[in-house]
């Protein structure tokens, strides 16, 4: 399910950017991009997958800062630290994503926040995020 969340989030952000006008991007927290999993083994990410491009750019800047001995200042300024996929499990990344994605897509009403926080499973929160993104796409698309 997490790859589907990333794909639909990218599609939603691209749609919002298109509606804003040529050259407009929707800001995405670098902390969220840092949680992105590796590209799916079967075919990778789509060519037009902007979140992967943003992640690659942030990773390049982070690695360049590390090489120059500026990694800590870069991380505190940009708030990006790439996730070490070998030591930060897919399950843990999905769990963090299931909360963090709501900072980008928002909730329908203010009183919907607490019940969302009380959802017991990562899978359920991700499913609800997919439903929310699809609702938004119907409203704007």
Image (tube, rainbow, N blue to C red):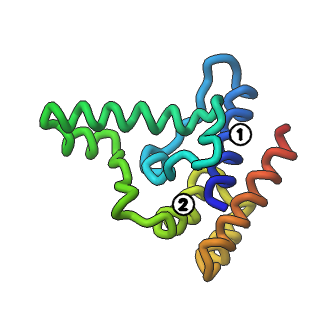
Picture quarter containing residue 73? top left
Please give the count of numbered marks on the rendered protein.
Answer: 2
Label 2 residue SS: helix
Where is residue 98 drawn, in percent x and y? Answer: 58, 64
Instruction: Please tell me which residue is depicted at 64% across the width and 79% down the height of the picture.
Output: 119
Where is residue 10 drawn, in percent x and y? Answer: 65, 41
- Which quarter of the image is occupied by the N terminus? bottom right
Query: Residue furthest toward the front?
Result: 42
- Which quarter of the image is occupied by the C terminus? top right
Alpha-carbon span between mark 1 and mark 2: 17 Å
Instruction: Please tell me which residue is depicted at 39% across the width and 35% down the height of the picture.
Output: 58
Side of 139 relative to 59 (left or right): right
- 26 and 9: which is toward the camera: 9
Numbered badge on residue 25: none
Instruction: Please tell me which residue is depicted at 85% across the width and 45% down the height of the picture.
Output: 139
Q: Which residue position holds label 2?
A: 97
Q: Which residue position holds label 1?
A: 11
Q: Residues within 10 Å of mark 1 (few under 14, many from 20)?
A: some
Q: Is residue 92 above or below residue 2?
A: below
Side of 104 relative to 4 (left or right): left
Where is residue 48 drawn, in percent x and y? Answer: 65, 29
Side of 69 relative to 84 (left or right): left
- 94 and 119: which is toward the camera: 94
Label 1 residue SS: helix
Q: Residues within 10 Å of mark 2 (few under 14, many from 20)?
A: many
Instruction: Please tell me which residue is depicted at 71% across the width and 39% down the height of the picture.
Output: 11
Picture quarter containing residue 86? bottom left
Where is residue 66 drawn, in percent x and y? Answer: 20, 38
Q: Is residue 39 above or below residue 83?
A: above
Q: Earlier in the sequence, mark 1 or mark 2?
A: 1
């Amino acid at each position: 399910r997490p790859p589907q969340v990333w794909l639909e989030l990218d599609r939603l952000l691209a749609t919002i950017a298109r509606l804003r006008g040529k050259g407009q991007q929707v800001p995405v927290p670098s902390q969220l991009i840092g949680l992105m999993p590796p590209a799916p083994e079967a075919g990778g990410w789509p060519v037009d997958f902007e979140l992967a491009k943003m992640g690659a750019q942030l990773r390049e800047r982070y690695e360049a800062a590390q090489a120059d001995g500026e990694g800590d200042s870069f991380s505190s300024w940009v708030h990006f630290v790439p996730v070490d996929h070998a030591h930060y499990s897919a399950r843990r990344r999905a769990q963090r994503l299931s909360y963090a994605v709501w900072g980008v897509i928002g909730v329908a009403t203010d009183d919907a926040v607490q019940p969302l926080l009380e959802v017991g499973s990562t899978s359920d929160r991700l499913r609800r995020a997919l439903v929310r993104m699809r609702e938004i796409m119907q409203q704007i698309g």
